[in-house]
Amino acid sequence: MPKGAIATVIFEYRFYQASAGRLDEEVERMREVAILGAPDVPNGPPVFKESLFDRYGIPRPLGAWTAISGPRQPLFGYIVRWNSLAERDAAFPPFWADPLWHAVRSRTDAGSPLVDRIDTWLMNPSPVWAAVRKDGPDTPVGGVHEMRIHHTRAGYAHYLSAALAEIELPQCQAFGAVVLGVFDVVIGPKMPAIISFIAWPDYETQQRARARLDVEPRLLQRMADDEADAGGPIVLSVEHTLLQPVDYGVPAANFGMSA
Amino acid sequence: MSGFNDYYELRLYRCAPGRLDDLHHRMGCEITPLFERHGIPRPLGYWDSFASSEAPLYAYLLQWPDLDQRMTAFTAFYSDPQWRAQRDASNAGATMVDQIELMILRPSSAWALNRTDGEPRPVPGLHELRMQTVSTRNAEAAHQAWGKVDLPFLRARGATVLGVFMCWFGADMPQMVSILGWPDFDTRARAYNEHDRDGSIADARRAERTEFGAPLFDRCNVHLMRPAPYGVARTNFAPLE
């Protein structure tokens, strides 16, 4: 996909708080409808090559994860790329109405809802992503992933975008991280919000890098300058979550959108 | 020996950017004589975290026999001119902490079921703070399930139970707070991956849903913490030496 084209797509953030003790059931429910071949009768064996998601034109997730640390656990989530919201709303609602899906949901609920809460947000690719992306082969990136949701003071998100693009994310890359993607939330809570997805080779590398970034003089100076310039705080809160990719949703570098 | 009638105070600080080392110095060195002067006990453990919703997180745990004594002690401490002078000097123009969450905790019945045998010893490695929201109607059943089903499973896979508590004063109640020790990140990851897929755990959750009409456990906030070298928590939260 050409580099300029990422501005024309929209991303859907779907994160599910599973019922206690049922995270793996949620991971497997998603596998059944998104990845495995569809059945021809409710709860039948897979007879088609295409999955139910495929049938309705719901793209395969660009990444799918369970959470290692952070709030909202047990947490399963994935992100999907759409070319338009018309495409999205022509795909999901008919899937939700399909008796084959109803049969899966009812069987996997097994008498009690498998999911307690769902966050469905819409995200645009952030200009920060274009600024820091390193194009290369779209190979899957494993390791320990990190989702950081920065909530900024309204009117001042551009300060954070610049600091992320110029200092923080390049520093993460220098410490061994792969930036999977950076998004601006366009529909969701506590906006403005910027979400970055970062892959670290392992937990130790992530810990060392975060400790060093916390005292990185250029970043601290930039934050102080920005806050002085803005007359107050830029970032109001950050939600940090460490994620483990699930086998069918290991994201590619740049979420597969390298030039 | 931790007292089962005692109160515990968990103090969670979201550290200002770049100030974690300063805060370690304050808590590990400077503050100790002042705490002593005002009857604030030596903490039972100190931690930091870069894998937390509040990162960079700084945390410590206190034990109190009496909450009124706690209130009196902190009031006296905060009004001590020496503390104020020291604080202003080490703050050096900007506070070290952006936000604070304090909780008063009491020992959970799940802890009584999962004591660690032997002489008290430090528990090095990775510590995990789990802040688990539980059913409002059946909170005690959640503690029992965690103590009888989950903690034995996790202990068999490398966990050491440092302590399990019920929140007595604080947010998102009823809340169950557990602090577990793990030898390392990978051991913990393996244990929870097995926990997520284990048939006996799934059966237990199903039986709970049937018995109580709804799940006993709601959402959980998990912080992966590093014990500070100057105060590595000991088994059963025995006092530091």
Image: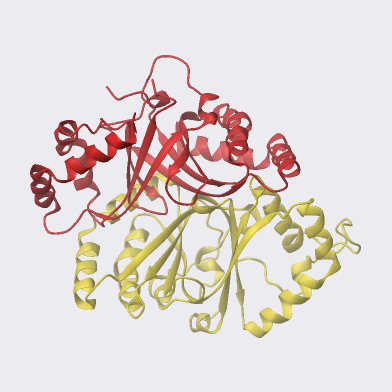
Asked where in the image residue B47 lies, by quadrant, the reply is: top left
Furthest toward the right, the residue is A41
Above or below residue B100? Residue A125 is below
Residue B130 visible in image: yes
- Chain corresponding to red in the figure: B
Q: Nearer the viewer, residue A120 or A181?
A: A120
Name the residue: 29% across, 56% down.
A213
Q: Nearer the viewer, residue B69 or A18?
A: B69
Q: Position of residue B103 (x, y in %)?
A: 39, 44
Furthest toward the front, the residue is B68
Above or below residue B57? Residue B104 is above
Q: Is residue A79 left or right of residue A175?
A: right
Name the residue: 76% across, 43% down.
B210
| Coloring applied to the structure | by chain
Asked where in the image residue A104 lies, by quadrant, the reply is: bottom right
Chain A colour in the picture: yellow
Above or below residue B189? Residue A182 is below
Q: Position of residue A205 (x, y in %)?
A: 38, 48
Above or below residue B76? Residue A175 is below
Q: Position of residue A18 (x, y in %)?
A: 64, 53
Name the residue: 25% across, 49% down.
B20
Q: Nearer the viewer, residue A50 or A147?
A: A147
